[in-house]
Image (cartoon, helix red, strand yellow):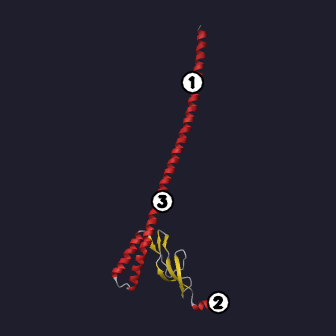
Amino acid sequence: DKNNNKKQNEAENTDVKEEIKDSKQKIDKQVGELKKKLEELENQVKRTLADYRNLENRVQNERGEWILKANKQLLLNILPVLDTLILVNKHSQGKDQNINLSVQQFLDILKKEGVVKIETLGKNFDPVLMEGVGTIEGTEGKVINETRSGYLLYDKILRPAQVTVGAGKKGDSEINSE
């Protein structure tokens, strides 16, 4: 009887051990699947977050571009007023301090908004920054006269300068042609 009970207990223990082993394998398999799903969900969340950040950056950049374009158009509409003030100042030979002050304030405000005057006089002609409106006797390729000031807006051309460029001396062209 004891041997039978012992054999029966051993058989039951073996069955229990196998059930535990099977259960453990099932649980390990489920844990593996859950870990895989968790990793997939984490990757999906990371991709979604990255997409959201990219969208946020793109919207911010587009907003900045719209503002810059709106500012550019406003500035292009205002620059002729500055041109007129500069002309009046030039014709009054700088004697009218009110006009001098107005021009300087105007330029200071533009500078605060990222607008910088393109320096042209005495420089080599640069077709990217300057628009040649004529040539006169003078050092070849150098800007001799500025007809209209040019400006940059945050290092991009707002309006090119209109300039007169030196074409060399009359004697130079005769010498060069011989």
> Which residue is at 61% across, 89% downward?
173
Q: Which residue is mark 2?
A: 177
Q: Quadrant of residue 86?
A: bottom left
Q: Which residue is under mark 3?
A: 62
Q: Picture quarter containing residue 7?
A: top right
Amino acid at dot 1: Ile
Q: Secondary structure at mark 3?
A: helix
| Rendered residue at 55%/33% (across/down) | 31
Name the mark nearer the viewer: 2 or 3: 3
Q: Residue at x 63, y 91 (%)?
A: 175
> Outermost residue, right direction?
178
Marks 2 and 3, how far apart at CA: 55 Å
Q: Quadrant of the C terminus?
A: bottom right
Image quadrant where residue 12 sits? top right
Amino acid type, callout 3 = Glu
Q: CA separation, marks 1 and 3?
A: 62 Å
Q: Earlier in the sequence, mark 1 or mark 2?
A: 1
Q: Can you give x and y, in whole percent of width and height, for residue 18 in the image? A: 60, 22
Look at the picture and state if 55 lies above or below 96: above
Q: Which of the two discs, 1 and 3, labels the residue nearer the N terminus? A: 1
Question: Which sits earlier in the primary sequence, circle 2 or circle 3?
Answer: 3
